[in-house]
Image: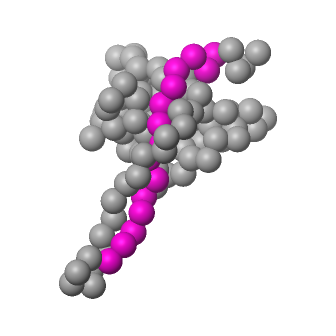
Amino acid sequence: MYDDLMTHTCYKQAAVSSQNAFGEWTESYTTGTTGIECRMSPLTAEEKIAESGRFDDVSYKGFFKSGASITLTDRIVYRSNTYKIKELTKDSEFHHIETLLVGL
């Protein structure tokens, strides 16, 4: 039943660390080629008012299946826009992951 709500597709960008020619560590991101089923829900004005300060910079709530390999260091690409993950929570019944996404 919950799977029927996953009507959107997004892509995960994973952080990759490497050393440059000067020996300094740099971080870049690689985008996965396989889409991830998700549900993207724009944040409403009511949510921003109710949680003043917590949601000020948040654009979307992203919902993913519990088996999705997503961490706080990843980024999400949805409709050609990239978002960093501000918060990541797993529900108590372990059937989905909820994220708060901030546009870059």
Q: Position of residue 20 (x, y in %)?
A: 26, 76
Locate the C terminus and report the quarter of the image it occupies.
Answer: top left
Residue span colored magenta: 5-19
Which residue sits at x=54%, y=37%?
A: 34
Q: Main secondary structure of the magenta part?
A: strand
Image quarter of residue 6:
top right
Q: Is residue 89 magenta?
A: no
Residue 93 sits in quarter: top right
Q: Position of residue 14 (x, y in %)?
A: 46, 53
Q: In this view of the protein, can residue 72 be seen by the observer? A: yes
Q: Position of residue 87 (x, y in %)?
A: 48, 44
Give the residue furthest to the left.
Answer: 22
Residue at left 41%, top 52%? 30
Residue found at the very far front of the displayed protein: 33
Q: Nearer the viewer, residue 62 or 93?
A: 62
Residue 18 included in the magenta stretch of the image: yes
Q: Does 7 sit left or right of 95 as displayed?
A: left
Can residue 87 be seen here? The reply is no
Name the residue: 59% across, 28% down.
37
